Amino acid sequence: MSETIVKEKWILLGAGRGLGLSFSSLVKRCYPEIELFIASRSINGFDFSKTDLFEFYAEKIVEFDADRVFYFAGGGPYGPFSKFEWKDHLWSLNVTFGFPAYLLNYLGKNNPKIRQMIFIGSAIAESQPDPHAGMYCASKHALKGLVESLKKEGYPIALTLFSPGYMNTAMLPKAAWPREKSRVDEPEAVAQQLLQLVINTASS
Ligand SMILES: NC(=O)c1ccc[n+]([C@@H]2O[C@H](COP(=O)([O-])OP(=O)(O)OC[C@H]3O[C@@H](n4cnc5c(N)ncnc54)[C@H](OP(=O)(O)O)[C@@H]3O)[C@@H](O)[C@H]2O)c1
C-alpha cells in the first residue's frame, strides 16, 4: 500500500501551524521518502491573501512537479459582520476560497502530472450558518460548491474535499462552546484520518 506513495512529491499549502503542521509532521515521520514542499506565510513566505501574487504562487507550485497538492489555509475575522472592515472580509474570502479557486483554474489549464488535489473544508461551516464568521462560512460553502461541481464536470485532476469538525487549533477561539462541551478533536488525530484517506485513495 505505502509502495504507491513513498516516491511521491507533495505540496502542503498553508501548513505553518494547526492541522497543516500536524499533517506535515506525521508525513515526515511515517513516510520520510515523500518529498514535501511546504508553503505558508511563515514557511517560504506564501501569503494567499495577496491576489497580485496568485499567478506567481501557481507557477511555483507547477515548478515543484508534485503528485498531490494539499490546501490547508483558511480563516477570517470572528465577531459581528459589520464590526469589521471590508478588507478583513476580503482577506477571508481570498485565503479560504480565492486562491484555491484560482489554483484550480490555473492547474486545469497547465496541469503537469498532479494526481490529486485535497482541500480542507469544514463539516460545520461549509453546510450550515456560522454566526460571527459569516465570510469564512460563505467561503467554505463556495469551496465545497466549486470542488463538487468540478468533480461532476470531469475536472482533469482527482479532487478531494476533507471536512473536519472542530479542532483544537489557534483558529478556534479559546472560549468557543465546542471546547467547553468537549466537542473538539486534536489536530494530530485529524491529520491521521487525512493521511489514511490519501493512502486509501492512492491504493484504490
Ligand atoms: N480549527 C477548526 O475548528 C476547524 C474546523 C473545521 C475546518 N478547519 C479548517 O482546517 C484548516 C486548517 O485550520 P487550522 O484549524 O489548522 O487553523 P490555524 O491553526 O489557524 O492554521 C491556519 C493555517 O493557514 C495558514 N495561513 C493562514 N493565513 C494564510 C495566508 N494568508 N497565506 C498562507 N497561509 C495562511 C497558516 O500558516 P501561516 O501562519 O504560516 O501562514 C496555518 O498553517 C482550515 O482550512 C480551516 O478552515 C478548522
Image (spheres, grey):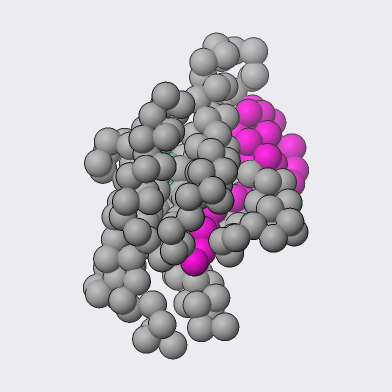
Residue 122 belongs to magenta span? yes
Query: Residue shown at 53%/38% (left/top)?
Result: 102
Residue 104 image point, x, y percent: 55, 47
Count of numbered marks: 0
- Quadrant containing the N terminus is bottom left
Residue 197 image point, x, y percent: 53, 72
Residue 99 image point, x, y percent: 50, 37
Left or right placement of residue 53 versus residue 71 in this view: left
Residue 150, above or below 174: below
Residue 63 belongs to magenta span? no
Query: Residue shown at 34%/71% (left/top)?
Result: 8
Q: Quadrant of residue 60?
A: top left
Residue 125 visible in the displayed image:
no
Query: Residue shown at 68%/53% (left/top)?
Result: 150
Left or right placement of residue 31 versus residue 73 in this view: left
Left or right placement of residue 44 versus residue 22 in this view: left
Q: Which residues are magenta?
A: 115-142
- Quadrant containing the C terminus is bottom right
Query: Residue shown at 51%/58% (left/top)?
Result: 117
Quadrant position of ligand 1: top left
Residue 95, above or below 22: above
Residue 59 image point, x, y percent: 37, 43
Q: Report the front residue among 45 and 183.
A: 45
Residue 6 visible in the displayed image:
yes
